[in-house]
């Protein structure tokens, strides 16, 4: 083989390296393009398939979404209903507990016929029924002046001083309208002026509920619960307080009737003054007390001068007018609860003056004498001036027992008559 042929053969059998590399690169690119096209076509086909499935099930998905929203709404409604039921159960439990306590309170209301004791029980039990959430006040109407007077109170702070003994503008509203009152926020209630509240009431009031004490026969007073916090009481609280007030009204009316019956037994029907037997019983007690406390006690014996002439000249009706006139003057001069004024018999009156010495008793007696002498009454249209003779005796200066003290004051009164009447004399 020639050299030329060898060179040709060498060229054919062993191609250059870069040719092989190019060939391999082209082959790889072709495979990559082929794979990419396959993947792209596969992904596109999948998208088309998913789009077809979505469009096919879109209506079903929308229906499911609507159902889901309906279910969520029903769940929310059920939650709200459950919360309402929980609150209702709590409210019912509170009511059941309250009314169980109310039954116990009613039993206590009826344990006494003494007005003061009933007032205390009503205030204390109402305080417990409202779990000590506010101050409690019981007011009764004074039939003589139609004003409210505090019967009893129960306060959260025992040191709190109540200056409004005859009520305030809230109590007056109940009195005028004869209906219960709920004030959720005293500073925002359109019925009441905040400035007037601050000026008239000495303590801070945030909220208040008041129920009238009413019986079929009369409006007797009010039962009040107040708090320094606003929004402390609800309509349910007011309804419950009204129930308490209705039950308390019966007990208070019974105690008032009992008190009136007792007064009929110990008071004179004409003058309204205590009878002699009551004075004697009270006098003995006061003498014992004065002995133990080493203090003094005085008695005034009062007799109307020339009383018989009024009956003879103007008739017995005129005599009654004179007796009532003197009784009213006695009530005015001796208005303090510690004094005991009585009709001793006929035209005679007696006044028991506890913790009063001789000089003080003489001063009071002279004040009474001048007051009676200075007044004029009409008997059958005729002006008449009345005078009295007054005797004064003091324990232990003039006597060492009640009956002896009465005798000594009676003797002093006759001494005044013998001295010319219209005088004050002591033993």
Image (cartoon, rainbow, N blue to C red):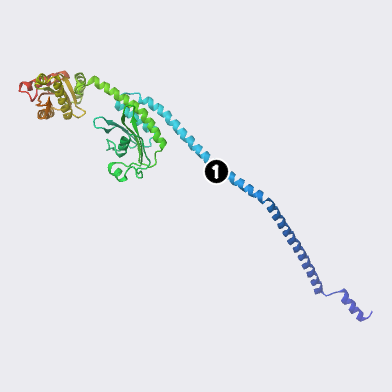
> Percent from the top left, x then y, of residue 309?
9, 20
**Point 16% across, 27% down: residue:** 330
**In which quadrant will I find the N terminus?**
bottom right
Which residue is more in the foreground, 117 or 149?
149
**Point 29% across, 22% down: residue:** 258
Q: Secondary structure at mark 1?
A: helix
Determine the image quadrant of residue 151: top left
Residue found at the far front of this picture: 381
Rate crowding at label 1 as few (under 14), some (14 to 19) or many (20 or more) other CA atoms within 10 Å: few
Determine the image quadrant of residue 5: bottom right
Determine the image quadrant of residue 250: top left
Which residue is more in the foreground, 317 or 420?
317
> Percent from the top left, x then y, of residue 94?
45, 33
Residue found at the far right of this picture: 1
> Percent from the top left, x then y, of residue 424?
9, 25
> Percent from the top left, x then y, of residue 93?
47, 33
Which residue is more in the foreground, 7 or 230?
230
Is the residue 344 above or below the residue 162 in the image? above
**In which quadrant will I find the C terminus?**
top left
Residue 260 seen in this snapshot: yes
**Point 24% across, 32% down: residue:** 145
139 lies left or right of 63? left
Q: Which residue is mark 1?
A: 76
Is the residue 27 above or below the residue 317 in the image? below
Is the residue 100 above or below the residue 275 in the image? below
Is the residue 335 above or below the residue 35 in the image? above
241 lies left or right of 271? right
Residue 359 seen in this snapshot: no
């Amino acid at each position: 083989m020639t050299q030329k042929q060898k060179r040709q053969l060498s060229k054919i059998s062993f191609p250059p390296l870069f040719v092989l590399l190019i060939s391999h690169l082209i082959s790889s690119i072709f495979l990559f393009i082929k794979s990419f096209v396959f993947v792209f076509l596969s992904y596109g086909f999948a998208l088309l398939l998913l789009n077809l499935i979505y469009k096919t099930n879109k209506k079903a998905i929308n229906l499911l979404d609507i159902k889901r929203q309906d279910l969520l709404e029903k769940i929310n409604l059920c939650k709200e209903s459950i919360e309402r039921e929980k609150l209702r159960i709590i409210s019912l439990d509170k009511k059941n507990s309250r009314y169980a306590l109310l039954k116990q309170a009613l039993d206590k209301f009826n344990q006494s016929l003494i007005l003061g004791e009933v007032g205390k029980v009503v205030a204390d039990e109402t305080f417990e029924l409202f779990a000590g959430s506010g101050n409690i006040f019981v007011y009764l109407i004074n039939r003589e002046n139609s004003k409210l007077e505090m019967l009893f109170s129960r306060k959260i702070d025992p040191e709190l001083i109540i200056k409004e003994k005859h009520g305030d503008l809230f109590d007056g509203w109940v009195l005028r309208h004869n209906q219960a009152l709920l004030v959720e926020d005293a500073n925002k209630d359109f019925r009441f002026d905040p400035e007037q509240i601050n000026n008239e009431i000495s303590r801070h009031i945030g909220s208040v509920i008041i129920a009238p004490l009413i019986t079929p026969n009369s409006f007797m007073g009010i039962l009040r619960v107040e708090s320094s916090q606003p929004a402390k009481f609800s309509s349910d609280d007011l309804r419950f307080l009204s129930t308490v007030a209705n039950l308390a009204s019966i007990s208070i009316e019974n105690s008032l009737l009992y008190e009136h019956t007792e007064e009929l037994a110990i008071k004179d029907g004409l003058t309204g003054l205590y009878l002699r037997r009551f004075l004697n019983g009270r006098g003995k007690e006061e003498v014992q007390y004065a002995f133990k406390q080493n203090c003094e006690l005085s008695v005034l014996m009062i007799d109307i001068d020339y009383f018989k002439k009024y009956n003879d000249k103007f008739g017995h009706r005129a005599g009654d007018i004179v007796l009532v006139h003197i009784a009213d003057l006695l009530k005015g001069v001796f208005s303090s609860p510690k004094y005991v004024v009585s009709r001793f018999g006929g035209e005679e009156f007696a006044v028991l003056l506890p913790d009063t010495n001789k000089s003080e008793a003489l001063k009071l007696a002279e004040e009474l004498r001048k007051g009676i002498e200075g007044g004029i009454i009409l008997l059958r249209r005729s002006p008449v001036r009345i005078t009295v003779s007054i005797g004064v005796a003091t324990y232990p200066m003039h006597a060492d027992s009640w009956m002896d003290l009465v005798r000594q004051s009676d003797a002093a009164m006759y001494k005044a008559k013998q001295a010319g009447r219209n005088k004050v004399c002591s033993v």
